[in-house]
Amino acid sequence: MNWIKNNRLIAGAIGLVIIVILGFVVFGGGNGDQEVVTVERRDVTEAVRIAGTVEARIVSDLGFETSGIVRDVSVDVNDVVYRGQTLVSLGLGTLGAELQSAQAALAIKRAEHTNTTVNIDAIRDKQDTLVANAYSELLSTGLIAEPQSPTYTETPPIISGRYTGGEGRYKLTIKSGSQSGDTDLYVFGMEDVESVEVNKTGSTPVGTNGLFVSFPEVPTSYYDTIWYVEIPNTKSPSYAAAYNAYQDALRERSRAVDEAEAEVRAQTSGASIADAELAQAEAEVARIQALIGQRVLTAPFNGTVASIDVDPGESVNANDSAVSVISNDGFGVEIDLPEVDSVKVRVGNPVSIMLDALGEEVFTGTVVSVSRSETLVDGVSVYEARIAFDKTDDRISSGMTADVSIETSKRPTVLSVPARAIKYREDGTPYVLLRKAEGDKGEEKEIVLGLRGSDGSMEVTAGLSEGDTVIIAE
């Protein structure tokens, strides 16, 4: 019995030693100060976190982020506007041509890329876009409003816009509004939407698929009339040309995809460009698109135009107020941004909101205005910003304290490592210790950094591959 007991003690001791050795190898990699991390793809997000207060109504003073010449003012004071509706736009100058050039360069980079599967997908996506554009042009060409009765004496309403829906027929009914002199538009058929007030001086949206209607005569003269819009308009003189262009796009898509697939099958090797060059081309397109976006002011929420401070042809400076919009209902959050954060936050940034009175529940919202004029609070410069809740909630009350997290930038599914894994040479060049084999001390590997996440992660745009092991030395 003593012999058995002694053997059990020896076996237990040996097992304990094995466990210690395994733990030393797995977690220490042969070095007691060594910690490792695997390079992986994830979303890297930069966010600004700050406290604010719920307010009953939102007043958004909108200004452009850049200077320019006003091209168009699409609304009037007291107009009811809808979230996303264009209010004022600046001239684009050469940006349109620059965008086309950048998009062409991007298409070339994608076609030259090493990954043949992505290459085919890029060609297919491009051709699908061309086919979709040709189809949209077919559906949008020559649209007219046809009267329900041949006895109508009114000039037919004008249909405009780029249609993005399906084929069918709209029914438009014009009625007297609730206020004297107002006119309401009712839309039926492919979409049944709430009535909207007819814009007396501009165009009025027809549903949600990109069409607009305007009235050549005084809108009140169209009371109790009904009009139909057939999509597509096969009677239009331009229909045949649009239809042929659509068929040509279908044939070209088939040809381009077949050629790409044949080239991949025949291809044994070929030249490719670096991922960094492709990313650079994509970034250039995104940069120009962002510049174009800075030249269009859109309504950040459903509301009413309170004032317009610019006219077409007028030169405006960046951050000057161009138009003010007041929310019709609902609540928002007012915050005071420190100077360092104010340059990061932009209109349109998504926001997560937690209210002290409602516990851990998270609400979503959108930044609708950021003042570029400082306000002194206790001698410190801050910049007022307003956030609109995406959805109404009866539990929300004015005066509640809010903790908000504003997503100022995001890189989806990019390579990343913890920021503490990154080291810097004397000249500022970042590098990591790349482990080639278990237990080694790591090889210095220079990297190129991108966005720094608020959670301590760091985007790596070049120098590492997914699955690499990086050593974090204590």
Image: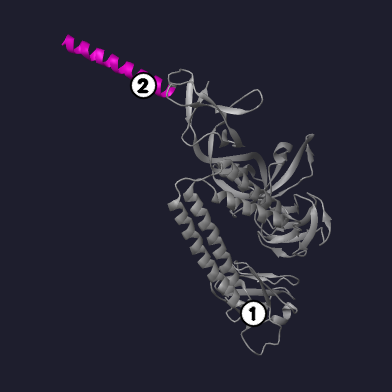
Please give the name of the residue rendered at 62% of the width and 47% of the height, measured from the top-left corner: 281
Which segment is the magenta one?
A: 1-27
**Left or right of residue 54: residue 123:** left
Q: Secondary structure at mark 2?
A: helix
Magenta region includes residue 22: yes
Q: How is the image coloured?
A: one colour
Measure how far apart labels 2 and 1 are at the Cα level: 79 Å
Label annotation for residue 145: 1
Look at the magenta stretch and give its main secondary structure.
Answer: helix
- Which image quadrant for residue 77? bottom right
Q: Amino acid at mark 1?
A: Ala
Label annotation for residue 22: 2
Mark with earlier residue (2, 1): 2
Above/below status of 171 relative to 4: below
Magenta region includes residue 467: no
**Left or right of residue 178: residue 258:** left
Please give the name of the residue rendered at 66% of the width and 90% of the height, measured from the top-left corner: 151
Q: Amino acid at mark 2?
A: Leu
Front residue of 421 and 331: 421
- Which image quadrant for residue 463? top right
